Image (cartoon, coloured by chain):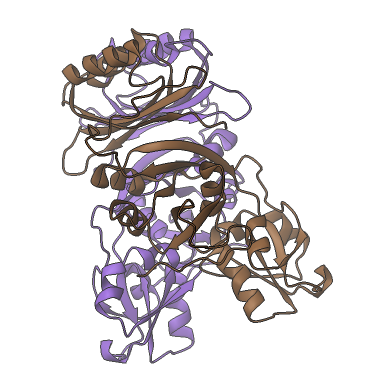
Chain colours: A brown, B purple
Amino acid sequence: MKPQHSEVKHSPATHSPVKRRIAFQGELGAFSQVAAAQLAGGDFVPVPFQSFEEIFLAVRNGKCHAAAVPIENTLHGSVHGNYDLLLKYNLPIRNETYVRIVHNLIAAPHVKFSDVKRVYSHEVALNQCRTFFENHSRIEKQVYYDTAGSVKMVMEKGLRDAAAIASAAAAEIYGANILKKSIEDDRQNFTRFFLLEKPKRREPLPRGKEEKPGDVTYKTSLVFTTRNTPGALFRSLSAFALRDLNLTKIESRPLRGKPWEYLFYLDFIGHTEDTAAKNALRHLAEIADMWRVLGCYPAGKL
Amino acid sequence: MKPQHSEVKHSPATHSPVKRRIAFQGELGAFSQVAAAQLAGGDFVPVPFQSFEEIFLAVRNGKCHAAAVPIENTLHGSVHGNYDLLLKYNLPIRNETYVRIVHNLIAAPHVKFSDVKRVYSHEVALNQCRTFFENHSRIEKQVYYDTAGSVKMVMEKGLRDAAAIASAAAAEIYGANILKKSIEDDRQNFTRFFLLEKPKRREPLPRGKEEKPGDVTYKTSLVFTTRNTPGALFRSLSAFALRDLNLTKIESRPLRGKPWEYLFYLDFIGHTEDTAAKNALRHLAEIADMWRVLGCYPAGKL
């Protein structure tokens, strides 16, 4: 699958060597592109791919400078598949951000709300706008493979009696018009994204940054497995608790075929070069069967 | 939304008073119905609903005897929305099971594999069969709102050049034919389901069963929040570790609008009436801000 080259209004794909190419999964205008914009903190070239594995490959092969990948959602939980890819491809996490999932009703210019008979979007998005559809029973739901893709399709076909549900970015990219803002049922719908980069040459893989600005809160993400003994998790967590390191995430994931063995995801506030963190990781190494730092990065705000 | 009354081949909807009505989300033949069959352990009437909230309501209102709800998937993580509904509706967990998600290529009888030009299914299912589509590039993917629903549609329209991807149960229910078995990329795709029932009258809500057969391994699921102090989670887990209770799940979920406060999901092996479990829960009550047992049930096998 070749990446589609973007021709995004607000970030045109020029040949300037300074613009970073950031890979993401989905169509142009996807929420992952919104995340890429937040993570890039400036001009960048969004490069869409069909699958998550393709974006990891694009960064490893140097086709893209970085990738924006969703890692968990406040309603749908952790994206285990992307944790697996983090372990497989060894791309260090360099930044994180939270994107609020806002669904907008979007149609071609000059289409009025009263014209709309059908609404296309990804099934998850349609299901997250139940109140809207209950209040407007004349409007029929139509499942489409992608939120931003539904805006693209409505625009390309010039539909006058249909609309799409997608991000405001999708409306802007495809030159469409927002008929109704924020029609989602639940405003507590946030997705956490990581920015991944290729590891620096000779960087002990992936152990985080060497430099640490003083005024930034850092977060460290790691994965570990424990031996199959009672209280192994509790002892693992003692490595952090005894050093007053604050955990911001802990999650177990059963290892299939290995009853009673688990993979743990753990995030804590701190930098891998802090003394407390160094000691905690050394202590964890005594207890865990396998452990790996996935990255050390400035903490995003939820 | 009224429930559709089922007319399933292998579990016909008769008026026998002994058959339990089990609510699930999706079309007849959905993986949730497969879970319901595993959980019911005998004849039952499957009652499909569109949304998860509807199945909780159906059990609370007595329209169904029980509900089968997905709670986590080995690839996609926990279904936080259903944890929220467990807290909202107070329906105790009575059983658990794991369903392996097996995707089959299904068409109308006498349709040959070489006839198939298009394949309909839920987007997630299509994406979990990438290798199949890469090996058969003549076949086009078509997103549909539901896996079992795609079999129903292919059969109702009598399509001769199309197939669907769904469970073997869906093929049986709609009288369709399995062209290829198990075309999913990843065989490690399991979903864990809970069986929920209405609490018994006067049952201290929902604290699990009173009776405990001796030879069954029980699991207890609970939710708790901790005070905003360093090491609060570690102290909470000590309630279990100090009594040698084995945890089978721990997961944090940030509480939005309350920085540094978290909801924790925790499962341990043991029955709420065991002395160690009773002591651990009393100990947890000293540490946690809020805690609630979601259920105590025979452990399923992954």
Q: In which quadrant will I find the N terminus of chain A?
A: bottom left
In terms of image quadrants, where is residue A167?
Answer: bottom right
Residue at the image position 69 percent from the left and 68 percent from the top: A175
Residue at the image position 43 percent from the left and 84 percent from the top: B155
- Residue situated in front as seen by the camera: A36 or B264: A36
- Residue situated in front as seen by the camera: B275 or B13: B275
Q: Is residue B196 left or right of residue B245?
A: right
Q: Is residue A191 above or below residue A174?
A: above
Q: Point out residue A288 in the picture as x, y percentages from the top left corner.
A: 19, 23
Residue at the image position 22 percent from the left and 32 percent from the top: A204
Q: Is residue B41 visible?
A: no
Q: In which quadrant will I find the C terminus of chain A?
A: top right
- Residue situated in front as seen by the camera: B128 or B145: B128
Q: Is residue B185 above or below residue A19?
A: below
Q: Is residue A129 above or below residue A93?
A: below
Q: Point out residue A239 in the picture as x, y percentages from the top left corner.
A: 29, 13
Q: Is residue A38 visible?
A: yes
Q: Is residue B79 above or below residue A217?
A: below
Q: Is residue B138 left or right of residue B46?
A: left
Residue at the image position 80 percent from the left and 75 percent from the top: A115
- Residue situated in front as seen by the camera: B154 or B298: B154
